[in-house]
Amino acid sequence: MGSGSRTALVEDLMERFPHVPREAVFKEDLLRGGVAFDPSALSDNEKGEVKPKSYFIFSFDHGTLPELGEAALRRPPEEIILTGGPYDLRRTVVSVRVNPSSPYRVAANEDGVLGLYLDGKRISDVGVPPMPEYYRHTLSNGKSVMEVAPTIQWGYLIYLTAFRVCQYFGAKEECQYCDINHNWRQHKAAGRPYTGVKDVDEVLEALDIINTYDTAKTSTAYTLTGGAITSKVQGLDEADFYGRYAKAIEEHFPGRWIGKVVAQALPKDDVQRFKDYGVQIYHPNYEVWDEYLFKMYCPGKERYVGRDEWHRRILDSADIFGARNVIPNFVAGVEMAEPFGFKTVDEAIASTTEGLRFFMSHGITPRFTTWCPEPTTPLGKANPQGAPLEYHIRLLEAYRATMDDFGLASPPGYGEPGPGRAVFSVSSFMDSLPAQEPAEA
């Protein structure tokens, strides 16, 4: 890329899509392409003042740990906040995805103040999350809270990856963009603690530490998730395996947090069990809308459940949870992934919008994660650049327009919507929705 070319592209998109907040344009570019870190911007891991990246489920990096240089030894921060600069950015929380060759770089200036640099020019100030008090305490068995119950989204969400691997295993079953199984292997290889199946009591102990020290009650929700279970884990099927954590949490901390579960689209009886266990929000992720791409990129899900049945189960689950509380995720960008993806942004947006209209017409509001092309996945290897930034910007526009068409408001369990307010860090969908006016007292 020629000097200044990335800046020119970003500014061109801001000009062409004035309805999309400029903050979201930078955020999507950082999520899709990653960011490099100067050693001056790395954390001191769990001993420092900055909250380090926890690798809560996927790597979300553009290199394997050995390829990240010093960032593999001193973790980067979990997230960064962009503010100010020549674009006068409102406070924007961005999940950190490391890419040593990114045109974006976080570094300290001569006064030690962190900033984000693009094409050598400082484009915003960078804030890093302070080390939360609860991360300074360990469980009775010596495990860290960060390993058992890390928090993301600037402390809003406790992320409980109860099962670190996925039973869709190998090339014929793994989702082609997902590195959950590789991430497990690389952390083990690096000698990092990375618990395969989290013990219910460990989770409760970690939550007790969070509850004790999170006196501001910043943590508002927890997500229970992990790999798909196609047979059993510890003798339990998927609904009972993940549901038992919710049951224990709700018994010990009734109503303290909004409980969410990310699981497969399960039959109605299983979904009912989630609800009975105390889960409030259900995320049966549909991953990608197009029929052919779902088959090619989610072969395990296609084989065990099938796309039509998956969608039917999503709609059925609204009978149990209420449509507002069924929030399926898709991986934004894989629509354009070689070898099978759409060749043009127009086609990709048309397909994704068709999916949004399908769900939103039933009152179900999907959400999305911006695809990170992780290098150990088939799609990451084939598409190191990810999807074009224009796709991501036009998706934000189409998403908001479709919500408006069906009169839907931002989904529950994500904090406040609106630029400068949103905390959801793995895509800009919350940043690009209108801020809600506070209700009249």
Image (cartoon, rainbow, N blue to C red):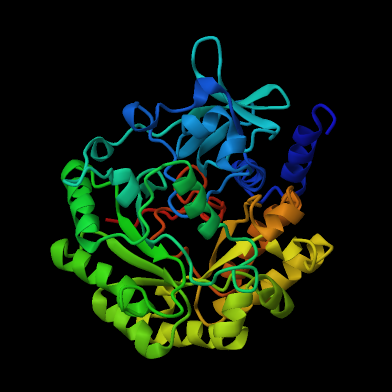
Residue in the foreground of this view, choosing between 362 and 61: 61
Tell me what residue is drawn at x 16 percent, y 65 percent.
254
- Percent x, y of residue 121: 69, 22
Q: Is residue 264 above or below residue 25?
A: below
- Percent x, y of residue 115: 56, 24
Q: Is residue 434 above or below residue 341?
A: above
Residue in the foreground of this view, choosing between 34 and 354: 34
Residue that lies at the very extreme toward the top in this rendered image: 110
Q: Is residue 132 above or below residue 328?
A: above
Image-based side of 396 in relation to 365, left or right: right
Tell me what residue is drawn at x 19 percent, y 47 percent.
141
- Percent x, y of residue 311: 56, 83
Q: Quadrant of residue 196?
A: bottom left
Q: Is residue 412 visible?
A: no
Q: Quadrant of residue 394?
A: bottom right
Tell me what residue is drawn at x 83 percent, y 34 percent.
1
Split into 4 quadrants, where in the image is the C terminus? bottom left
Image-based side of 357 in relation to 364, left or right: right
Residue in the foreground of this view, choosing between 319 and 373: 373
Tell me what residue is drawn at x 57 percent, y 23 percent.
38
Q: Is residue 36 above or below residue 324?
A: above
Q: Quadrant of residue 45?
A: top left
The count of marks equals: 0
- Percent x, y of residue 321: 36, 80
Q: Is residue 390 visible?
A: yes
